[in-house]
Amino acid sequence: LAWLGGIPERIGYETSKRRGILTIVVPVPRQAMHQVDYFLVLLKWAGLRVRFGAEYRFYYRPEDEKEAQDLLKKRGLEPKRFVALHIGANWEPKRWPFSHFARLANLVSETFSCPVVLTGSLGDEEAAQKIMARATAAPPISFCGKTSLGVLGALYRRAAFVVSSDSGPLHI
């Protein structure tokens, strides 16, 4: 699209399948880095000043914090620590298998005596039911479809840790 649109400067990494249409081909960074920094490298090659290694924050409202607290309290999880498993993803290849999530839920329950909360969209509730049926140690609690993005952030702040499929909430 950039080439068809007549954009005069097209910058990308040398591993790109479309490197033939690039005007500036950038070597792939050798060191591991956050995805944001990976794309900032391209901006640097374009001549822009960039700052790498920024601290990333997720902001939510005090009302979101209160709603997360109420949600946890209603399920008997406040003030307990819990583990959150985000089971949702936009595409099947980015999803971890349900059986793996169920096994992890069992391991967390057995090893740490810690409740497990499942998060995702309303469309993930069927998957949550499958996971809960397979998690025999202590069935997880599903919050799928019950949180806004802000409430999800507040919920994750209270979790002992979060395990997520490759999806947007992974970056919270």
Image: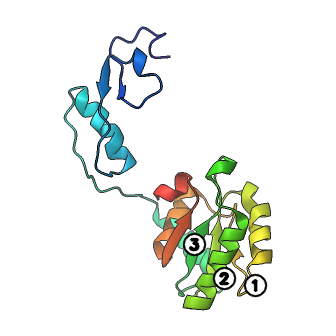
Left or right position of 2 against 69: left
Q: Amino acid at mark 2?
A: Asn
Q: Residues within 10 Å of mark 1 (few under 14, many from 20)?
A: some
Query: Closer to the N terminus: mark 1 or mark 3?
Result: 3
Could you say which quadrant of the image residue 56 lies in?
A: bottom left
Q: Are marks 1 and 2 in contact (CB under 8 Å)?
A: yes
Q: Residues within 10 Å of mark 3 (few under 14, many from 20)?
A: many
Q: Residues within 10 Å of mark 2 (few under 14, many from 20)?
A: many
Q: CA distance from mark 3 to mark 2?
A: 13 Å
Q: Nearer the viewer, mark 3 or mark 2?
A: 2
Query: Closer to the N terminus: mark 3 or mark 2?
Result: 3
Query: Closer to the N terminus: mark 1 or mark 2?
Result: 2
Q: Residue at x 72, y 69 (%)?
A: 99
Q: Nearer the viewer, mark 1 or mark 3?
A: 1
Label disc, if present, on residue 84 of the rendered structure: 3
Could you say which quadrant of the image residue 114 lies in?
A: bottom right
Q: CA distance from mark 1 to mark 2?
A: 7 Å
* Residue 167 percent location from the top left of the image: 56, 52
Q: Is residue 119 above or below residue 160?
A: above
Report which residue position mark 1 lands on. Answer: 136
Report which residue position mark 2 lands on. Answer: 106
Left or right position of 130 against 42: right
- Residue 32 seen by the camera: yes
Q: Amino acid at mark 1?
A: Thr
Q: Give SS at disc 1.
A: loop
Q: Amino acid at mark 3?
A: Ala
Q: Give SS at disc 3.
A: strand
Q: Residue at x 63, y 62 (%)?
A: 147
Q: Which of these two is toward me, 61 or 52?
A: 52
Q: Residue at x 32, y 37 (%)?
A: 28
* Residue 76 percent location from the top left of the image: 65, 86
